Image: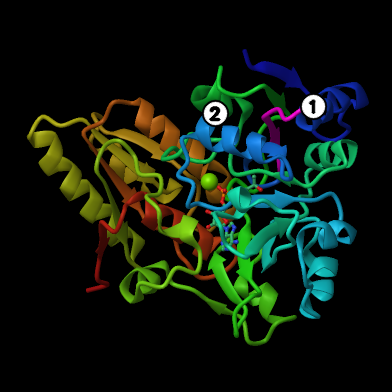
Amino acid sequence: MTDLLAVDPRRPEAAVIARAADCLRRGGLVAFPTETVYGLGVNAFDEAAVRRLFEAKGRPAVDPLIVHIADAAHLPLVARTVPASVQALAQRFWPGPLTLVLPKTAAVPGAVTAGLDTVAVRVPAHPVAHALLAAADLPVAAPSANLFSRPSPTTAAHVLQDLAGRIDMVLDGGQTDVGIESTVLDLCGPVPTVLRPGAVTIAMLRELLPGVVAREASRDARDGAMPSPGLLTRHYAPRAPFTLYEGADHARVCARILAAARVALGQGQRVGVLAADEDVTALTAEPALHVVTLGSLYALDTVAARLYAALRELDAAGLDVILGHGFPAGGGMGLAVRDRLRRAASGHVVTVDTD
Ligand code: TXA
Ligand code: MG
């Protein structure tokens, strides 16, 4: 049985938080909203609970978890050494969607870190997450609260779709704000490296860490390096084959999608399109298409917030093929949106030339 508890996302009720914190302290599995996506939390120091969490998600043990703390002052519980840069980073970006990879303390079980000597840590900004961490008075290991190979959940309903009956409790605090998982910044190597792009952008990090670089997942695969094991395991991909169309000329990209869609429709296939608002008029030419829009090409925060719900909707529609419009990777959430779309496409990316 999974208990579903409604909670005020801005002023979480103390009684609800106390129940959830008690569940965590007893080794339970509690899903809760963060500002990025819903997390599935357990006491990070309780190895048996951590193992149950991997089992509930069907997650491979090689994929390490993020440990959530209520305040940067709790870092020494989980991080053995704290590089000088951390204070400034924490001051600027915590609480918020930035995860730091640091050397771990002996107290953090290897089950949390997939046997690595490092631990990923963040201080979430969502009032419910913060209240829960403070009440439990524990570091809480929490991956996204989805089944392995499904999109991260941005609502409590998504969590229940995947994990009803497999976890103890879900705190329903409504839809999450950012919609895409936190930026992961590795501070253990010679150069500070962004392992996963998110709402805290490289440009924002560069103000404090001029040498910060982005790690390309494709380069890791080529070199055989394993800086972030979880990022190399099979990621979410829709059930139907998904092809992403990228290009600077958005009308051309849309025309290309429409052409590919017509071929598939002609073969009797059910076709879904993950579209930008700007595509909608052109796509109405084919009423048989299942069109899901993410927002304007120039409203990337909205696109990020809707992305995972849209992928779930397309999955549920029973399609044979899905065609997606790539969004500009330039500023803000652009890089993070492109990263998640490319992962969903598992490398099936068509570049549409400008002429
Ligand atoms: O926004 C988020 O980060 C959400 C919310 C719930 O906080 N959590 C989340 O967790 O996305 P998860 O487990 O889905 O993704 C965590 C990723 C892993 O896949 C891995 O790539 C990276 O963080 N990671 C964790 N520990 C690491 C470590 N020691 N070294 C390198 N990367 C690590
Ligand atoms: Mg995840």
Most foreground residue, 347 or 190: 190
Q: CA distance from mark 1 to mark 2?
A: 19 Å
Magenta segment boundaries in residue numbering: 26-34
Residue 312 at x, y percent in the picture: 43, 33
Looking at the rendered image, the disc whose residue lies closer to the viewer, 1 or 2, is 1
Residue type beneath disc 2: His
Which corner quadrant holds the C terminus?
bottom left
Q: Position of residue 75 (x, y in %)?
A: 82, 61
What's the amino acid at mark 1? Ala
* The quarter of the displayed image where residue 310 is located: top left
Which residue appears at 70% of the width and 63% of the height?
Answer: 104
Question: Which residue of the protein is positioned furthest toward the left in this rendering?
Answer: 267
Q: Which residue is mark 2?
A: 158
What residue is at 78 percent from the left and 54 percent from the top?
123
Query: What's the mark number on residue 343?
Result: none
| Numbered mark located on residue 20 in the image | 1
Q: Quick check: 154 left or right of 9?
A: left
Q: Are marks 1 and 2 in contact (CB under 8 Å)?
A: no
Query: Whole-percent x and y of residue 325?
Result: 35, 53
